[in-house]
Image: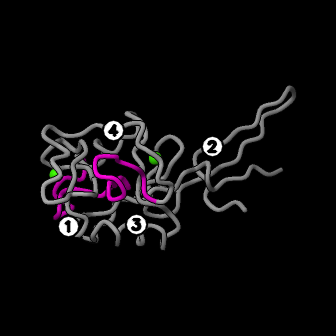
Amino acid sequence: MLKYVLAIVCLHNLVSVYCLTVSCPNGYTRHASSCYRFHHVGLSWPESVTFCKATGSHLVRVETEAEHDFLKLKAKEMLGRYPLYSFWIAATDAVTDGEWAWADTLTSLTYKKWALGQPNNGLGEDCAGLYYQGGYDFGDWLCRTLLHPICEIDFTDGIELVG
Ligand SMILES: [Ca+2]
Ligand SMILES: [Ca+2]
């Protein structure tokens, strides 16, 4: 099923190029192979995981420096429009303290860039986000803290090339 498509996908062969025009769903911004939406609602981390799922996405997994740089740039561009300032990402160490993994897949983080002094695990801070005071590098919070979720749709999850 062609669920979400974005950018222009071209299939090359010797005689021709087939292109498929594709785009992110309304309200999402594309970068590389994903669509992102910074939500204005303030939610706890577990609520954010559920919220993104309910909207056909997942709480963002920041997997590369390029992806992180894009998200930091977007967050800085939108400064002042999000009253809670910081944003949840899908990383948690609730299973084993100090071992940060992505929600759902529970795979270890291969990329991470903590803000200065983070994670400080104060009073059992098991959930991570992009920390405004740390230039949107990673920070950890109590999971019940209200922050804004960033939801992500992976291009590679949703597309099937047809024709
Ligand atoms: Ca990602
Ligand atoms: Ca912290």
- Mark 3 crowdedness (10 Å alpha carbons): few <14, some 14-19, many ≥20: many
Q: Amino acid at mark 1?
A: Thr
Distance, label 2 to label 1, CA atoms, is 39 Å
Residue 162 or 63: which is nearer the viewer? 63
Label 4 vs 1, first from the N-terminus: 4
Specify which label sits upstream in the sequence, 3 or 1.
3
Query: Residue, x 17% and y 43% (percent of image)?
Result: 118
Mark closer to the chain start, 2 or 3: 2
Q: Position of residue 38 (x, y in %)?
A: 34, 59
First-in-chain label (2 vs 4): 2
**Marks 2 and 4: which is nearer the front?**
4
Q: Earlier in the sequence, mark 4 or mark 3?
A: 3
> Which residue carries the number 4 mark?
112
* Residue 36 or residue 116, whichever sits in front: 116
Work out whether 145 lies above or below 75: below
Residue at which label 2 appears: 8
Q: Who's the residue at 54% across and 44% down the image?
A: 33
- Three-letter code, disc 3: Val
Q: Quadrant of residue 13?
A: top right
- Residue 49 got which mark? 3
Residue 69 is left or right of residue 17, and the answer is left
Residue 149 is inside the magenta segment: no
Residue 119 on image: x %, y %: 20, 45
- Give the amino acid type for the residue marked by disc 4 in the picture: Lys
Callout 2, which amino acid? Answer: Ile
Q: Which residues are magenta?
A: 77-103
From the image, tell me which residue sits under label 1. Answer: 145
Q: How is the image coloured?
A: one colour
Q: Residue at x 20, y 67 (%)?
A: 145
**Residue 43 in the image, given as x and y percentages of width and height:** 28, 71
Up/down of 54 relative to 86, above or below: below
